[in-house]
Image (cartoon, grey):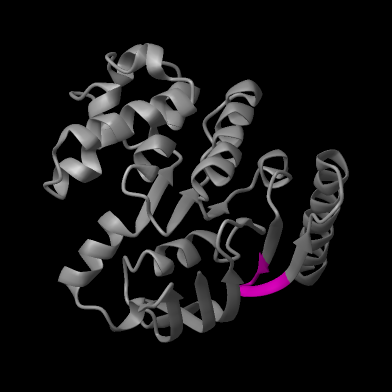
Amino acid sequence: MLNIENLYKSFQVGNKNYEVLKGISLNVKKEEFVGVMGPSGSGKTTLLNAISCYFPIDSGKIQLGDINLVDLDEKRLSFVRNQKLGFVFQDYMLLDGLSILDNIMLPRIIAGKVNKQMENSANQLCEMFGISHIKNKYPAEVSGGEKQRTAVARALINNPLMILADEPTGNLDSKSSKAVIESFIQAKKTVEATILMVTHDSFAASYCDRVIILRDGQVEFVLNKKDKNRSDFQKELLNTIQTLGEENENEEL
């Protein structure tokens, strides 16, 4: 589904060049729920932005299905972002002037695919994520968890190849966080969604099939959940992140 090889990205600030991604290679299989974690500054958000093609990379390969994202022009990239990728952000990115249902349908409205089937699909997603009772309300009238489940539904309205989620539980309490992560699990089971989620939240990451740990712009570990229960996998994630943090502190001394 997603294949990344030898991805490099640096930023020029004044006369200095800062390497952020240093030869990252990874893959995400169809219907897989993969998390990305790592200390602050490890390159998590830059990686997600590179996959989204919001800036050019220095070198490497980003293959989504049969599409080589690196070679696309801006027109084709816009099509891929709207039709092939679904996005879920920490701050929801809902339009206040649109109802919950209209926010879910927005990608299809932008694409000019306004029809009865679109509305039926949006209603089905509302039912799937337990937000049918708020579909005619506006974002200001619903909770943070409901806003984020709306964002997940919107990300799925075009049946994308992959959902990219950037800290989707960052602004939520524990109950709402669980509801949002369960909506990802539901999407994976029901519509065969493939999800790549950047997070600092070990609780959210413990629901993933695999978690990729970044450090200093490189893949440091890949932890597989396999047959572990969620609690044991969370402990493994916490121990790994804590160890990396201690190593970083020692290197700075």
Indicate yes or no whether the magenta region holds residue 78: no
Whether residue 42 sits left or right of residue 161 in the image: it is: right
**Image quarter for residue 131?**
top left
At x 45%, y 84%, the residue is: 61
At x 83%, y 48%, the residue is: 233
At x 29%, y 59%, the residue is: 81
Residue 202 lies, with reference to residue 50, above or below; the image says above
Which image quarter is the C terminus in? bottom right
Residue 205, image x, y percentages: 68, 47
**Image quarter for residue 180?**
top right
Picture mark count:
0
Majority secondary structure in the magenta region = strand
Whether residue 194 sits left or right of residue 101 in the image: it is: right
Whether residue 166 sits left or right of residue 78 in the image: it is: right
Instruction: Tell me if residue 91 can be seen.
Output: no
Residue 181 lies, with reference to residue 13, above or below; the image says above
Q: Tell me the magenta residue range.
A: 214-220
Whether residue 170 sits left or right of residue 249 in the image: it is: left
At x 55%, y 66%, the residue is: 43
Instruction: Tell me if residue 6 can be seen.
Output: yes
State the residue in front, 85 or 24. Answer: 85
Residue 16 lies, with reference to residue 46, above or below; the image says below
Residue 20, image x, y percentages: 51, 74
Residue 138, image x, y percentages: 27, 17
Residue 151, image x, y percentages: 39, 36
State the residue in front, 176 or 79. Answer: 79
